[in-house]
Image (cartoon, rainbow, N blue to C red):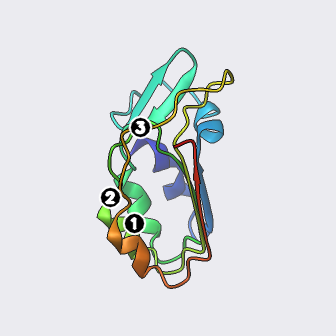
Amino acid sequence: APLLKEVKYLQGIRAYTVDLSGTALWELPSDNDNPTNVLGFAGKVELLEVPEDLRKLHEELRELHLNVSALAVLPEWLGEFALLEALLLDGADNADDGGVLNSSLRVLPEVLGDLQALKTLTLEGF
């Protein structure tokens, strides 16, 4: 998948933090890919879905930051991240003018309650 395609070249390196927040997405390199799980307009980039390739990191990821401003649901497989200690869900688009808040995401998956290692859950922009 386009967002994680560079990871395949990093053999033996473990990912403990993944940042797909508005700021990080704003800085994604442009390589003529047009991924279907990312929406870009007026200099802004927003996830339309949580990239499935992220699921491959379920045995090592400790911290996850997600821009969820364009999402209505989160995938149930987020509950597979047994070592996840911090989850930040940012519902505001990454506009500097205060942005638009997410009014679509109303319910978190129940499986997030099963994350034994989770110490911090941050909800912003809702």
120 to 73, vertically: above or below: below
Q: CA distance from mark 2 to mark 1?
A: 6 Å
Image point (38%, 60%), residue name:
108
Residue indicated by mark 1? 78
> How many labels were placed on the picture?
3
Outermost residue on the top side: it is 42
Which label sits on residue 75? 2
Report the front residue among 45 and 68: 68
Q: Nearer the viewer, mark 3 or mark 2?
A: 3
- Name the amino acid, label 3: Ser
Earlier sequence position, callout 3 versus callout 1: 1
Earlier sequence position, callout 3 versus callout 2: 2
The spot of residue 98 in percent (x, y) is 65, 26
Report the front residue among 99 and 24: 99
Image point (32%, 58%), residue name:
75
Secondary structure beneath label 1 = helix
Q: CA distance from mark 3 to mark 1?
A: 21 Å
Residue indicated by mark 3? 103
58 to 123, vertically: above or below: below
The spot of residue 122 in percent (x, y) is 60, 59
Query: In screen coordinates, is 47 left or right of 19?
Result: left
User: Cβ–Cβ below 8 Å for labels 2 and 1?
Assistant: yes
Q: Which image quarter: residue 65?
A: bottom right
Q: CA distance from mark 3 to mark 2?
A: 17 Å
Query: In screen coordinates, is 87 left or right of 109?
Result: right
Image point (39%, 56%), residue name:
53
Image point (65%, 37%), residue name:
23
Query: In screen coordinates, is 116 left or right of 53?
Result: right
User: Cβ–Cβ below 8 Å for labels 3 and 1?
Assistant: no
Q: Specify few, some or many for label 3: CA neighbours under 10 Å numbering under 14, 14-19, or 20 or more.
A: some
Q: Specify few, some or many for label 1: CA neighbours under 10 Å numbering under 14, 14-19, or 20 or more.
A: some
